[in-house]
Image: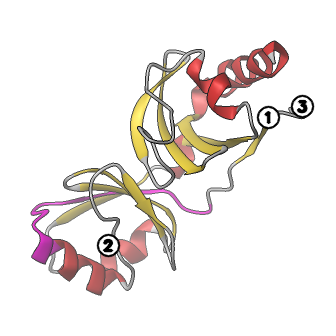
Amino acid sequence: MHDQDAIIRPLDLPSLTALRLYKPSPDHVRQASRALGFELAGPPNTFTAGPARTARLAPAEWLVTQGPPMPEITARLAGILHHASDIRPGKLGWILSGSRAADILARDCTLDLHPQAFPPGSVTCTLVAQVPVILERIDNTSFSLIADRSLEDYLKAWFADGLEAW
């Protein structure tokens, strides 16, 4: 689906691991980062890219969207109290980009999407079209959305309607 002002395309999710640390203190996060071989994202509601792409959803919770598979993460964190789950089978993702991307999302998302309120590098759990999503602002005109696979047809119809409105 696309037009000149907005494009929606699938987001490639080679791996998708939900990671929780028992103690999210700065020292514990540094210890886990060293063990993993990549940095966990900084403050909550931010993401980082590098050898792995991580989104910090809460003080003790990350989403690793590109990086080693969950069994390898678990092996690297041996000795550090954590929980890791492979959530990829139940999720799908999309990239919405273009000059009207924020306008399309704003139709059915109560989050303030202005770049000053939700700047590039931000991530959050929110509702879009009454669907729980993980929404990430990649740059000023691009967003990624991750949602439950069972809602694929509903979200595709919602995206199509949003693109037609512009």
Crowd rating for badge 1 (residues with CA inside 10 Å; few <14, some 14–19, many 20+): many
Q: Please report the residue visible at 53 percent of the width from the left and 51 percent of the height from the top.
A: 88
Nearest to the observer: residue 1 or residue 16: 1
Q: Is residue 44 left or right of residue 52?
A: left
Where 103 sits versus 98, above or below?
above
Where 40 sits versus 129, above or below?
below
Q: Do the CB atoms of the residues marked 1 and 2 lie less than 8 Å apart? A: no
Crowd rating for badge 2 (residues with CA inside 10 Å; few <14, some 14–19, many 20+): some
Q: The residue under label 2 is which amino acid type?
A: Thr
List x then y, in percent, for residue 87.
46, 49
Q: Which residue, given by chain and number where applicable, does mark 2 sit on?
A: 74
List x then y, in percent, for residue 13.
62, 56
Q: Is residue 33 left or right of residue 38?
A: left
Q: Do the CB atoms of the residues marked 1 and 3 lie less than 8 Å apart? A: yes
Q: Is residue 32 left or right of residue 81?
A: right
Q: Quadrant of residue 73?
A: bottom left
Q: Which mark is residue 6?
A: 1
Residue span colored magenta: 14-28
Q: Which residue, given by chain and number where applicable, does mark 3 sit on?
A: 3
Nearest to the observer: residue 107 or residue 148: 107
Q: Please report the residue visible at 59 percent of the width from the left and 34 percent of the height from the top.
A: 149
Q: Nearer the viewer, mark 3 or mark 2?
A: 3
List x then y, in percent, for residue 63.
40, 55
Q: Is residue 111 left or right of residue 81?
A: right
Say which element carries label 2.
helix
Which quadrant is home to the N terminus?
top right
Query: Residue 27: within the magenta?
Result: yes
Sequence-wise, the earlier of marks 3 and 2 is: 3
